[in-house]
Amino acid sequence: MTTSVSPDDTVISEELRSFIDLESNAVTYEIERHAVERFACAIGDTNPFYTNKKFAESSSYGGLIAPPTFFRSLLPGDYPLPYPEPFAHILDGGSKYRYNEPVRVGDQITVVRKITDLFEKDGRMGTMLFKISEISYTNQEGRLVATQTTTTITYGTGAKDSGVGNH
Protein backbone atom coordinates (compact mmCIF):
# COMPACT_ATOMS: atom_id res chain seq x y z
CA MET A 1 0.00 0.00 0.00
CA THR A 2 1.38 3.43 -0.89
CA THR A 3 0.43 6.98 -0.16
CA SER A 4 0.36 9.96 -2.45
CA VAL A 5 0.02 13.66 -1.87
CA SER A 6 -1.42 16.28 -4.16
CA PRO A 7 0.92 18.95 -5.55
CA ASP A 8 -0.38 21.35 -2.88
CA ASP A 9 0.32 18.91 -0.05
CA THR A 10 3.61 17.75 1.37
CA VAL A 11 4.57 15.04 3.81
CA ILE A 12 7.31 17.34 5.10
CA SER A 13 5.61 18.96 8.07
CA GLU A 14 7.02 21.77 10.15
CA GLU A 15 7.78 19.15 12.80
CA LEU A 16 9.90 17.23 10.27
CA ARG A 17 11.60 20.45 9.12
CA SER A 18 12.56 21.17 12.73
CA PHE A 19 14.94 18.18 12.53
CA ILE A 20 17.06 19.78 9.80
CA ASP A 21 20.45 20.64 11.40
CA LEU A 22 19.40 19.08 14.73
CA GLU A 23 22.27 16.95 16.03
CA SER A 24 21.80 13.48 17.46
CA ASN A 25 23.10 12.63 20.88
CA ALA A 26 26.84 12.00 20.67
CA VAL A 27 28.10 8.44 21.16
CA THR A 28 31.79 7.73 21.79
CA TYR A 29 33.42 4.42 20.89
CA GLU A 30 36.79 3.05 21.98
CA ILE A 31 38.37 1.47 18.90
CA GLU A 32 39.46 -1.96 20.10
CA ARG A 33 41.99 -4.23 18.41
CA HIS A 34 39.77 -7.30 18.36
CA ALA A 35 36.81 -5.37 16.94
CA VAL A 36 39.03 -4.14 14.08
CA GLU A 37 40.41 -7.65 13.49
CA ARG A 38 36.91 -9.20 13.47
CA PHE A 39 35.64 -6.51 11.10
CA ALA A 40 38.58 -7.00 8.70
CA CYS A 41 37.99 -10.77 8.77
CA ALA A 42 34.24 -10.33 8.17
CA ILE A 43 34.85 -8.24 5.03
CA GLY A 44 37.64 -10.55 3.85
CA ASP A 45 40.36 -7.90 4.04
CA THR A 46 43.74 -9.42 4.97
CA ASN A 47 45.63 -6.12 4.97
CA PRO A 48 48.29 -6.43 7.72
CA PHE A 49 47.71 -2.80 8.77
CA TYR A 50 44.48 -4.09 10.37
CA THR A 51 45.67 -7.34 11.94
CA ASN A 52 49.45 -7.55 12.29
CA LYS A 53 50.53 -5.40 15.24
CA LYS A 54 54.29 -5.73 14.62
CA PHE A 55 53.93 -4.90 10.93
CA ALA A 56 51.65 -1.91 11.62
CA GLU A 57 53.94 -0.55 14.35
CA SER A 58 56.86 -0.49 11.91
CA SER A 59 54.81 1.43 9.33
CA SER A 60 54.23 5.17 8.99
CA TYR A 61 50.94 4.64 10.88
CA GLY A 62 52.84 3.56 13.99
CA GLY A 63 50.18 1.01 14.93
CA LEU A 64 47.09 -0.85 13.85
CA ILE A 65 44.45 1.09 11.92
CA ALA A 66 40.83 0.27 11.08
CA PRO A 67 39.54 -0.42 7.55
CA PRO A 68 37.83 2.65 6.08
CA THR A 69 34.40 0.98 6.11
CA PHE A 70 34.75 0.25 9.84
CA PHE A 71 32.81 3.50 10.36
CA ARG A 72 29.61 1.67 9.38
CA SER A 73 29.83 -0.22 12.68
CA LEU A 74 29.88 3.00 14.74
CA LEU A 75 26.25 3.96 15.10
CA PRO A 76 25.12 7.48 16.03
CA GLY A 77 22.87 8.14 19.00
CA ASP A 78 19.20 9.01 18.91
CA TYR A 79 17.91 12.49 18.27
CA PRO A 80 16.91 14.41 21.42
CA LEU A 81 13.26 14.01 20.33
CA PRO A 82 11.62 11.08 18.52
CA TYR A 83 11.88 11.55 14.74
CA PRO A 84 8.31 11.77 13.35
CA GLU A 85 8.72 9.37 10.41
CA PRO A 86 5.57 9.60 8.26
CA PHE A 87 6.17 6.37 6.29
CA ALA A 88 6.49 2.66 7.07
CA HIS A 89 9.12 1.30 4.69
CA ILE A 90 12.80 2.11 4.28
CA LEU A 91 15.43 1.91 1.54
CA ASP A 92 19.14 2.71 1.72
CA GLY A 93 19.73 5.36 -0.94
CA GLY A 94 23.52 5.12 -0.64
CA SER A 95 26.40 6.73 1.20
CA LYS A 96 29.35 8.92 0.35
CA TYR A 97 32.43 9.04 2.58
CA ARG A 98 35.17 11.59 3.09
CA TYR A 99 38.21 10.25 4.93
CA ASN A 100 40.56 12.77 6.52
CA GLU A 101 42.86 10.44 8.45
CA PRO A 102 42.98 6.81 9.53
CA VAL A 103 41.33 5.59 12.69
CA ARG A 104 43.83 3.89 14.97
CA VAL A 105 43.29 1.15 17.50
CA GLY A 106 42.97 2.95 20.84
CA ASP A 107 41.27 6.02 19.37
CA GLN A 108 38.04 7.27 20.87
CA ILE A 109 35.66 8.19 18.07
CA THR A 110 32.61 10.35 18.75
CA VAL A 111 29.74 9.93 16.29
CA VAL A 112 27.09 12.60 15.65
CA ARG A 113 24.40 12.61 12.94
CA LYS A 114 22.36 15.51 11.63
CA ILE A 115 19.77 15.77 8.91
CA THR A 116 20.88 18.27 6.28
CA ASP A 117 17.98 18.07 3.82
CA LEU A 118 14.51 16.59 3.34
CA PHE A 119 12.68 16.37 0.03
CA GLU A 120 10.01 14.22 -1.55
CA LYS A 121 9.46 12.62 -4.92
CA ASP A 122 6.59 10.70 -6.46
CA GLY A 123 7.32 7.32 -7.98
CA ARG A 124 5.82 3.90 -8.62
CA MET A 125 5.57 3.37 -4.87
CA GLY A 126 3.77 6.67 -4.33
CA THR A 127 5.30 9.56 -2.43
CA MET A 128 8.80 8.91 -1.12
CA LEU A 129 10.64 10.97 1.49
CA PHE A 130 14.36 11.45 0.93
CA LYS A 131 16.37 12.26 4.04
CA ILE A 132 19.97 13.40 3.59
CA SER A 133 22.07 13.05 6.74
CA GLU A 134 25.67 13.80 7.58
CA ILE A 135 27.43 11.66 10.15
CA SER A 136 30.64 13.04 11.63
CA TYR A 137 33.37 10.94 13.21
CA THR A 138 35.67 12.93 15.51
CA ASN A 139 38.64 11.54 17.43
CA GLN A 140 39.70 12.19 21.03
CA GLU A 141 41.87 15.10 19.89
CA GLY A 142 38.89 16.89 18.36
CA ARG A 143 39.94 16.16 14.76
CA LEU A 144 37.26 15.25 12.25
CA VAL A 145 38.58 11.93 10.89
CA ALA A 146 35.69 11.22 8.50
CA THR A 147 32.21 12.18 7.40
CA GLN A 148 29.52 10.03 5.86
CA THR A 149 26.65 11.50 3.85
CA THR A 150 23.69 9.12 3.68
CA THR A 151 20.46 9.09 1.73
CA THR A 152 17.53 7.30 3.36
CA ILE A 153 14.32 6.80 1.42
CA THR A 154 11.04 6.04 3.19
CA TYR A 155 7.64 5.31 1.65
CA GLY A 156 4.31 3.57 2.09
CA THR A 157 1.94 2.77 4.91
CA GLY A 158 1.25 -0.20 7.13
CA ALA A 159 3.38 -1.81 9.82
CA LYS A 160 6.71 -0.02 10.11
CA ASP A 161 9.83 -1.85 8.96
CA SER A 162 12.34 -2.59 11.70
CA GLY A 163 14.61 0.43 12.20
CA VAL A 164 12.57 2.80 10.04
CA GLY A 165 12.60 5.54 12.70
CA ASN A 166 16.29 5.17 13.55
CA HIS A 167 17.91 6.40 10.34
Image: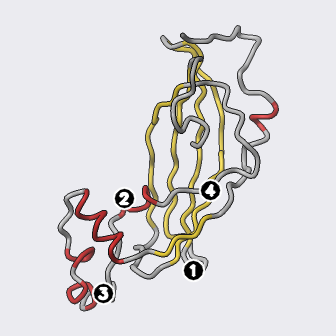
| Vertical comparison of 100 with 15: above or below | below
Asked if the residue at tag 3 contacts the one at tag 4, i.e. Cβ–Cβ closer than 8 Å, the answer is: no
Q: CA distance from mark 1 to mark 4?
A: 17 Å
Query: Which residue has dot 3 on it?
Result: 60
Residue 6 badge: none
Quadrant of the snapshot with the N terminus: top right
Q: In the drawing, does residue 112 fall left or right of residue 62?
A: right
**Mark 4 or 3 closer to N-term?**
3
Identify the amino acid type marked 3.
Answer: Ser
Residue 31 in which image quadrant = bottom left
Say which element carries label 1: loop
3 or 2: mark nearer the eye = 2
- Distance from label 2 to label 1 (Cα)? 19 Å
Query: Which residue is nearer to you in this view: 50 or 136?
Result: 50
Q: Can you tell which of label 4 and label 3 is closer to the viewer?
A: 4
Give me the residue at 75% from left, 52% from top.
Answer: 80
Q: Is residue 162 above or below residue 76?
A: above
At label 4, the amino acid type is Gly
Q: Which residue: 25% across, 56% down? A: 43
Query: Which residue is tagged 2?
Result: 69
Q: Which badge, 3 or 2, is on the more N-terminal residue?
A: 3
Q: What residue is pinned by disc 4?
A: 77
For the residue marked with disc 1, what is the amino acid? Gln
State the CA–CA distance, disc 4 to disc 3.
33 Å
Q: CA distance from mark 3 to mark 1?
A: 20 Å
Q: Residue at x 21, y 63 (%)?
A: 45
Q: Earlier in the sequence, mark 3 or mark 1?
A: 3
Q: Position of residue 24 (x, y in %)?
A: 68, 55
